[in-house]
């Protein structure tokens, strides 16, 4: 049976002493992205790495095919530091465009609600 990356990540995130809001803010993504990752059967190693650094969790135990134990030895937490970030080619990243689309929809929705409240 093949590993479901999203379920493994969700289990680790839920056991951590950090809210999804705090974690998503630390990673610079919206909470919806976090939920999207939880349902994906395959998650990019770059995302798993950033999550591991943000949570201070060694994902080399769950994903030895991606990481070695030394990858998570640096005790600094991910905080947007470019030395931690592996920048993917965003034009080929479906998750990037999906997150961008959802973010724009959320902004449009809040603007429409604000406009409706003003014109009433």
Image (cartoon, grey):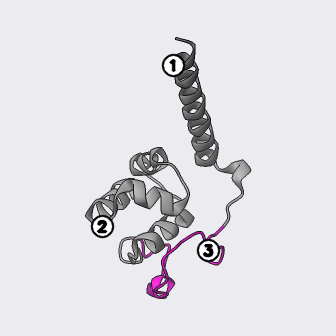
* Residue that numbered label 2 is attached to: 16
| Nearer-N-terminus badge (2/1) | 2
Q: Which of the two residues, 93 or 85, is positioned nearer the viewer here? A: 85
Query: From the viewer's perspective, is residue 113 above or below residue 58?
Result: above
| Nearer-N-terminus badge (3/1) | 3
Q: Which of the two residues, 41 or 118, is positioned nearer the viewer here? A: 118
Q: Position of residue 60 (x, y in %)?
A: 41, 77
Residue name at image x 62 percent, y 74 percent: 81
Q: Is residue 3 magenta?
A: no
Q: Tell me if mark 2 has few (under 14), some (14-19) or many (20+) residues whose alpha carbon lies within 10 angstroms of its own.
A: some
* Real-space Cα separation, disc 3 to disc 1, in angstroms: 40 Å
What secondary structure is found at the residue carrying circle 3?
Answer: loop
| Nearer-N-terminus badge (2/3) | 2
* Real-space Cα separation, disc 2 to disc 3, in angstroms: 21 Å
Note whether residue 1 is visible: no
Magenta span main SS:
loop
Which quadrant of the figure has residue 17?
bottom left
* Residue that numbered label 3 is attached to: 81
What secondary structure is found at the residue carrying circle 1?
Answer: helix
Residue name at image x 59 percent, y 69 percent: 80
Query: From the viewer's perspective, is residue 41 above or below residue 106?
Result: below
* Residue that numbered label 1 is attached to: 117
Q: Which span of residues is magenta-colored?
A: 63-86
Q: Tell me if mark 1 has few (under 14), some (14-19) or many (20+) residues whose alpha carbon lies within 10 angstroms of its own.
A: few
> Which marked residue is nearer to the observer: mark 3 or mark 1?
1
């Amino acid at each position: 049976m093949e590993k479901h990356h999203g379920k493994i990540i969700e289990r680790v995130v839920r056991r951590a002493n950090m809210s999804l809001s705090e974690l998503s803010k630390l990673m610079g993504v919206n909470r919806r992205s976090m939920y999207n990752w939880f349902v994906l059967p395959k998650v990019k190693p770059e995302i798993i790495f950033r999550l591991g650094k943000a949570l201070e969790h060694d994902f080399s135990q769950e994903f030895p095919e991606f990481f070695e134990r030394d990858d998570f030895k640096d005790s600094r937490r991910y905080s947007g530091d470019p030395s931690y970030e592996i920048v993917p080619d965003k034009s080929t990243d479906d998750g990037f465009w999906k997150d961008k689309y959802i973010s724009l929809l959320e902004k449009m929705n809040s603007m429409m609600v604000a406009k409706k409240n003003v014109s009433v």
